[in-house]
Amino acid sequence: MNNPLYQKNIISISDLSREELELILTTAQSLKHNPQPELLKDKIIASCFFEASTRTRLSFATAVQRLGGTVIGFDNAGNTSLAQKGETLADSVKIIASYADAFFMRHPQEGAARLAAEFTNIPVINGGDGSNQHPTQTLLDLFTIYETQNRLDNLNIAFVGDLKYGRTVHSLAQALSLFNCNFYFISPEALAMPDYILEELNEKGINYSVHASIEEVVDSLDVLYMTRVQKERFDETEYQHIKSAFLLNADMLENVRENLKVLHPLPRVDEININVDSTPYAYYFQQAQNGIYARQALLALLLTNHFQDQA
Amino acid sequence: MQHKLQVEAIQHGSVIDHIPVQQGVKIIRFFNLTQTDEKITIGLNLATHTGQQKDLIKVENTFISDEQANQLALFAPRATINQIKNFKVVHKFQVQLPDSFIGVLACPNSNCISHHEPVDTRFYVKKKSTLKLKCHYCEKTFDHSFFRELD
């Protein structure tokens, strides 16, 4: 059976259909339980970080190596021709892509991955372009929800923290809008979900509501997705006043649903108290590990046309 | 009753009619119509049959292409274009907002990659009624008031 993602680019989560998302998630699950250490043994993957990243870069490199592939690339654009000699990104991509079978990139400017894909014929995977998209993060989030809830449809999901600037929550809400979930948005008023996301949800007929604190809704949730409210966006007095509404501690989880899972894209600061770590609801560290399987799934599907038949 | 033309008729060329007030001068500037040697007549704040006001532009010996007509829709979504030959209207059509604009507008997002690379900008029309455009590269959606060229 041909797979619809073979040789495709993964630039924006909204480029993927519900069926394609489901294919990636079931492939991630398959690879988690049945490792394929030789699947990419003849493949070279370019991993180009024009902007620093630790977890995404290490997770991606691990994913390639666990599938038997080889990684080339750089983790800092400072030493590249792009920075040193003024080469355009378009030229850099053309050259590097001629050495490799797939191109994974992070870049500080929005639209860089879309542009890169127009200058090469190998699959481009967006590892984050400025404040725009980070689809592999969204895929690992979706995989974690799917793994812990056994479905993506009709879930009650709360997003907490910085909903205005957090690209993670924007992309996840956009992806989950294909699955008819109920959303609860909990943030300081100044960091509320942007209008364009709410308009998209309205157009799709998705139920959502806005709340002032986690406690208002926590007992009816399947997934509690926490993010950090950045202190630097407020003055000190205002921050001390508002922050308690957006912090989670174990006492707040006494009457929650058994299947509740608390997720976080990490790194956390103080928005999840460490006393939550030992509860059965904490799943953020497993979520980070799932990044490896989500990225393996993408590589497997982009680079092998008949992966499902082999698995 | 004697009728009097508000703006002198032209022999050959195009008449862009039903331009919202304030937009006529912007159109002249956007299409670089001041760079041509052809005779151009501009009418600002002209009265319409319904008692409202409009702008109007007449350009002699110039016929507006479909692509230009589409771009006109950025300023005047309900404008009509009359093509004149020997003082007669030989073709009349309304401009239509296209699905996308390529290489016409700069992205209002200063951190968009399109500012730094050898590519044409591309915007998709998201909402025709209030003219919202989404950048192909940075994926941000902007109201028309964000575009310097349309200001």
Image (spheres, rainbow, N blue to C red):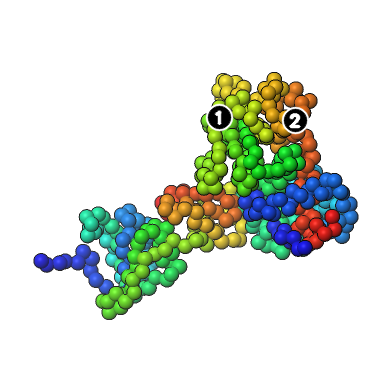
Q: Which residue is located at x 76 percent, y 47 percent?
A: A294
Instruction: Kindly identify which chain the residue marked by label 2 belongs to.
Output: A
Name the kind of residue labelled 2 in the image.
Ala
Q: Which residue is located at x 62 percent, y 51 percent?
A: A14
Estimate how packed mark 1 is, as few (under 14), some (14 to 19) or many (20 or more) residues with alpha carbons within 10 Å: some
Q: Which mark is residue A166?
A: none
Viewer-closest of B59 and A297: A297
Viewer-closest of A76 and A71: A71
Indicate the secondary structure of the residue bearing disc 2: loop
Whether residue B1 is situated above or below residue A112 in the rendered picture: below
Q: Which residue is located at x 55 percent, y 54 percent?
A: B135
Report how far apart the C-alphas of labels 1 and 2 lie in the structure.
22 Å
Indicate the secondary structure of the residue bearing disc 1: strand
Q: Which mark is residue A282?
A: 2
From where the camera sits, is residue A78 visible? no
Q: Position of residue A129 (x, y in %)?
A: 65, 48
Estimate how packed mark 2 is, as few (under 14), some (14 to 19) or many (20 or more) residues with alpha carbons within 10 Å: many
Whether residue A139 is situated above or below residue B76 in the rendered picture: above
Q: Position of residue B142 (x, y in %)?
A: 49, 49
Q: Position of residue B93 (x, y in %)?
A: 36, 69
Mark 1 highlights which residue? Answer: A211
Q: Relative to A16, is A29 on the left or the right?
A: right
Q: Relative to A304, is B124 on the left or the right?
A: left
